[in-house]
Amino acid sequence: MPAFSALYIEDPCRSLPRVQDILKKCADIPHIRCERYGEVFNPAAQNFRVQKKRPGLILAKKYQNRVLPAPPGYGFGNANSYYFSHLLNCPYDCRYCFLQGMYRSAHYVLFVNYEDFEKEIAETIEKCGDAPSYFYAGYDSDSLALEQYSGFVNYFLNVFKNFPQAYLELRTKSAQIRSLLRHEALPNVVIALSFSPETVAAQWEDRVPAFSKRIAAAKKLEEAGWPIALRFEPLIDYKGVQADYQQLFIRIFDALDVNKLHSVSTGLFRMPKTYFQNIVKLYPDEALFATHDETRQGMAAHSKEIETAQRRNLEKMLFDFIPQRIYYRCALACEPA
Amino acid sequence: MLHLVIALIHEAKPLIAHYRMSSLRGNHPFKIYTGDALTLIVSGIGKPAAASAVGYLQALSRENGPAAWLNIGIAGHQHFRRGQGFIAHRIQDRATGRCYYPPQVLPFSASSGNLITVDRAERHYEEDSGYDMEASAFYNAAIRSSTAEFIQSYKVVSDHPQASVEKITKAGATQNIAARMDEITPLISTLQNGIADYRKIHVPSPHFDHIAQRWHFSETQKIQLQHLLRRAQVLFGAQFPIQAAPESHKTAKGFLSALSETLAAHQLSL
């Protein structure tokens, strides 16, 4: 787990028991007070790449926009789809991740007022009436990241246990699943695991646990009855990509029971142009960005021809392993987990 | 490159001696000393002096690329013992209330603490903090030309409620800093190493000057050339692919176009 460089604590949340618990766990690093997390997180003239080596943890309250509509095409729910972010930034360092271009700082921001999130989630579910609703918790971070400090999973499993008509997706690259295994599996909580070929992981997914550990964790979750989803994104073009995915699919579907899978999706390498430009400034020495030159509808992406061919080939391979009914295309890729 | 900003010559003396720095010749409004990848400016006391000194060094070294900045000096503190050193992890400007948070992401070995920058010497020490007269202005000026991780302020406690500011002597200031060189020199090394790594990443392509002189490039084309050459350096190293070799082209436009197409068509090998 990450060693934080410092803890920054917003004045209004210092007295919360959840915060006091984290302060005790991080007693040996500086505790620095601030009025609002933006004072630390938002100033210009910060360098995400330098900070990523040893980020700090900011403990803050989120006062508004706690639950937001999910972007069109994101996730497996067609309507009533929402996302919420208790954590900004991620302990993993994936070079293709849009967070590097979205935020100026690599510090983690943990919003500790879970009770307010819970209230807003409950209100949103109520508004949907009897219709199912879908909540994604891995948009601005990895859902299981920093669990030993945040206790996020433990808290929100208890929330969603009371709303069987509402689905929660926890998206992760983590192999730390103890918090899940301590609970009885919930049919409305989907554990979405992101996988890339090992060559991609070795090149661009720093600090992510090894494939063998993650697939073992997936197997344990499956055995415990948790709905498992697989996410293959972003699809990056390179020589030998198809053979690598073929190998990846063989290993994954050899380990997991396809009949128990909740869903499988693929996502393209797409990123808002402004984020991409920020990332190129941070990583001018990164080959992944040196080949890219195409922007379509404000998004940096592979060429249309490459995207189409790659997705078609991958889907063809995938459908040798899974039924098409559990597959969907995710419209947005390059998310953290 | 690291710039040291120090209010008093008596505080600067141990550093000048340790790094064998020599006085910068010429007519300057501040005393400036230089050493190996190191510049030291004696700013004078107070916020306006610190900001002016940073600005002067920024102008003087504007062609040299990004640098790290370190403000060193003596300070008061509510309860730290005299002679204790600390890096400021939160700097508050008492006059404006504005706070700065120099990121502590580099592996500094010195401990850290709060610092309040005051306009007049502090005598009450009411908060759990150090008190100085330059850091907020130093930081606010330095972030205009560098990134926050490489801008730090290090203070040695010279006064506290039981040992008032009036008792500070010139020799005492020198002694305070000299006694903390065991913390200051690693801090300087860490910042120097950090900024050196950062500068390496942003080194322009070695081909730029040569190619820019080969044809006439407009200013826009020069920027495009810089970007394309940087990408080519990442993908192909020192050698251009044959289709984008400068010798194969007769105009700037033709070369830029060929290089751009070559880069876009390149498929990565992992």
Image (cartoon, helix red, strand yellow):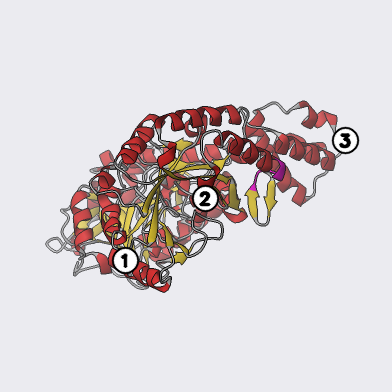
Residue at the image position 69 percent from the left and 44 percent from the top? A293
Circle on res. A98: 2
Identify the amino acid type marked 3.
Lys
The image quarter in which residue A93 lies? top left
The image position of residue B207, as x and y in percent, is: 70, 33
Identify the amino acid type marked 1.
Glu
Q: Is residue B129 magenta?
A: no
Judging from the image, what secondary structure is the residue with disc 2 in? loop
Judging from the image, what secondary structure is the residue with disc 1 in? helix
Q: Chain of mark 2?
A: A
The image quarter in which residue B49 lies? bottom left
Q: Chain of mark 3?
A: B
Circle on res. A118: 1
Circle on res. B161: none
Circle on res. B250: 3
Residue at the image position 52 percent from the left and 27 percent from the top? A247
Q: Residues within 10 Å of mark 1 (few under 14, many from 20)?
A: some
The image position of residue B59, as x and y in percent, is: 56, 54
Q: Chain of mark 1?
A: A
**Reading the chain from its start, which is encountered first: label 1 or label 2?**
2
The reply to whether label 1 and label 2 mark residues of one chain is yes
Q: Is residue A303 magenta?
A: yes
Give the magenta part as a residue range. A301-305
